[in-house]
Amino acid sequence: MFSFKGFITQDRNTHLEHLWRLEDDIINRGTQGGQNALNFLRSVRDMLAGSSNKKVNMTVKWDGAPAIICGIDPENGKFFVGTKSVFNKNPKVNYTNADIRKNHSGELGNKLSIALKELSRLGIKGVLQGDFLFSQSDLKTISLDGDKMLSFTPNTITYAVPVDSSIGRQISRARMGIVFHTKYTGKTLASMTAGFGTVRGRSTNVFLASAGYKDVSGSAKLTRNELAQFNAKLRMAEGSLSKAAPLLDKMSESSADGLGVGFRLKTFFNHYIRGSAGHMAKVRTLVDMFRDYYINILQAEIDAKKTDKGKQKYKDILATNLKFIDRNKNALVMAVASHVTLQNAKDFLINKMSEIQSIGHFLKTSTGYRVTSPEGYVAVDKVAGAIKLVDRMEFSRANFTMPKGWSN
């Protein structure tokens, strides 16, 4: 049903933290980020239009938790399981259940014990990272529109399949489910680099979900009208990016200590999405809101300082950056317009790709379950790297408000 191909090396073991939300890349990397974003969108467009001369590597993002790191320790040849803490300065690497009891507790410890037993039988070569989807105790039978469904909710999204379907029977037999998406290479755990990778094979006890995207029915192809709509969005993004380019380059070089204008523009969008009603305000309204947001952030820093000297430092930063914002307001309008337009173009493609589903995706509400899309997709380019395609107004808002129970 799905196939997975593609591998891209990251600079260090950053656990794919280099996967940016596509629209954020214009703030992270300025002009180059804008070009990367446009190139990705064009590549996915060509894939869906059936006009691409090469394969586009596209992986589906599952909303699993906790993250599981497992495989063969290159230093001793032993199989291990763990969380991202295997890469800590003082790593928590579990070769036995005794190790798990020493390093972890509660539900996390229970899931790691299941993973140690079941994943050690898969014949994994090297080191892989995946997201835990379910154990037997996580599976629930629910009714959706009168249909009996087998469901699990590892994080924010509830996944559901008909109980009597082929995939439903696979899940009901499995002792755990996991989706692998990352492969690590290196001579030691501390020096490993990360790229895309998975495990092939079958296991009755482990449901191995695929991270690969493949249009198997043709229903995710862009129609002529949809292609015209999407191309119009791209032209809008190109126009605003050309006008915002000098400002975006300046912001990409600004401080990432929480005080720079560029850094705070990214956090503003997250802040806005948390409190939004599911739609973006007009661009000039967003710019005015960002200015107020930035003042509030710096004012909180000023108020938190006990000495006049400490307060003055942040007063100076606020005054300098407010001048920057006001002096570049027109360019900032174009930067925000670029961000919003790229987000709209990305969501257009996500909605189209989400028409191909082998498993239902739902968000639990106070009145039942609401249909939603997958968490998102990751597009891979050999030059630019990888860019995360996430519907921020749908998944991100739900994810921001969902309490998290996993720790290392």
Image: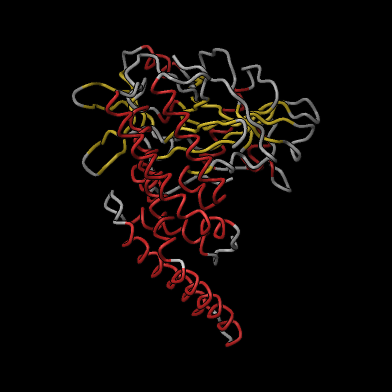
Query: Toward which corner of the image does residue 310 lie, by quadrant?
Result: bottom right
Identify which residue is drawn at 76% across, 39% down: 191
Instruction: Inspect this view and state whether residue 176 appears.
Output: no
Identify which residue is drawn at 58% across, 43% down: 17
Q: Position of residue 84 (x, y in %)?
A: 62, 41
> 93 or 201: which is nearer to us?
201
Q: Is residue 81 left or right of residue 149?
A: right
Q: Position of residue 248 (x, y in %)?
A: 52, 56
Identify the image's colour scheme: rainbow, by chain, secondary structure or one colour.
secondary structure
Q: Position of residue 50 (x, y in %)?
A: 41, 18
Instruction: Inspect this view and state whether residue 197 appears.
Output: yes
Asked if residue 376 is positioned above or below residue 277 in the image, the reply reads above
Asked if residue 356 is positioned above or below residue 297 in the image, the reply reads above
Q: Quadrant of the N terminus?
A: top left
Q: Is residue 50 left or right of residue 189?
A: left
Asked if residue 228 is positioned above or below residue 320 in the image, the reply reads above
Identify which residue is drawn at 81% across, 31% down: 75
Query: Toward which corner of the image does residue 334 lie, by quadrant?
Result: bottom left
Q: Is residue 345 left or right of residue 97?
A: left
Q: Residue furthest left?
A: 146
> 384 or 313: which is nearer to us?
384
